[in-house]
Amino acid sequence: MQAEGLILAGGKSTRMGGRHKGSLIYGDKTFTHLLVKELKREVSRVRVSYGREIKDEGTGCPVVMDIYPECGPIGGIYAGLRACEREWMLTAACDMPLMKVELYRYLIDMLEKREKTENIIYDGAVPVTDGRIHPLAAVYRAGRPGLRRKNMADLLEEQIGRRNYRIRDALKGLNILYADLSKEARFAQMLCNINTIEEYERLKNMKDQRI
């Protein structure tokens, strides 16, 4: 699969007391660096998405700034799709330090099989656990060569123009393959978000116990 990676790192980290989540340390690396390392196992290039300010320097990755700031993750995904030079884009939120590239390989494999057997072209694959969708850890089609209908970036731009910044609403207008991973414990852990100081402390304690 011809793909690039996008790490969404433009959040305000309000529940973390303003501390940028991508700069938090797990092991000996920041969350962002861990994700870069994982995504580079699968893709040709990883970009890091920010809103108005770069928060975690030194990744060696090209930076994508929001074209439409202050509209949340939908703005980062939109800017990433516009910058993407491959057909597919693998997205990850910067607060998912346990993410592994195996999740994306699973989604990609499912996409390829379904498109082949059903003769359907999907705009992406989004994981689902216990009824909850995870649109920030997904695989999206950045380009639709040879197709006349609007691509995902065009549809996101139209929704942003209507000031509807809910990425879940945007997905409703797309042909998305929802992958139910509720019975896959390994994937459920990868999709875990670290949003608060308490969750971060539990993560560090888990790391210490493994050592």
Image (cartoon, rainbow, N blue to C red):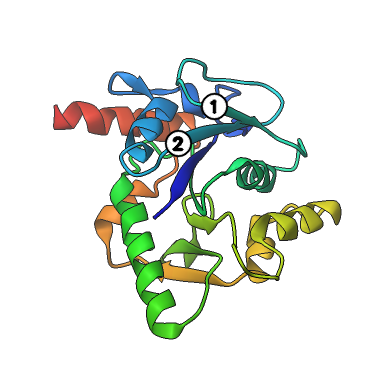
Direction right: furthest residue: 162
Residue 31 is marked as none
What's the residue at 67%, 47% (across, down)? Answer: 78
Classify 10 Å Cα crowding around label 2: few (below 14), some (14-19), many (20 and above).
Answer: some
| Image coords of residue 131 (percent x, y) | 46, 68
Q: Secondary structure at mark 1?
A: loop
Give the quarter of the figure containing the N terminus. bottom left
- For marks 2 and 1, give the CA distance: 8 Å
| Image coords of residue 152 (percent x, y) | 65, 59
Classify 10 Å Cα crowding around label 1: few (below 14), some (14-19), many (20 and above).
Answer: few
Say which quarter of the image contains residue 153: bottom right
Q: Earlier in the sequence, mark 2 or mark 1?
A: 2
Residue type for callout 1: Pro
What's the residue at 54%, 27% (across, down)? Answer: 62
Say which quarter of the image contains residue 127: bottom left
Q: Nearer the viewer, residue 90 or 126?
A: 90
| Image coords of residue 185 (percent x, y) | 26, 58
Direction left: furthest residue: 211
Q: Nearer the viewer, residue 12 or 57?
A: 57
Q: Which residue is mark 1?
A: 62
Q: Nearer the viewer, residue 156 or 131?
A: 156
Q: Which residue is mark 2?
A: 45
> Looking at the image, is 20 positioned above or below residue 82?
above
- Residue 77 as seen in the image, left or right of residue 164: left
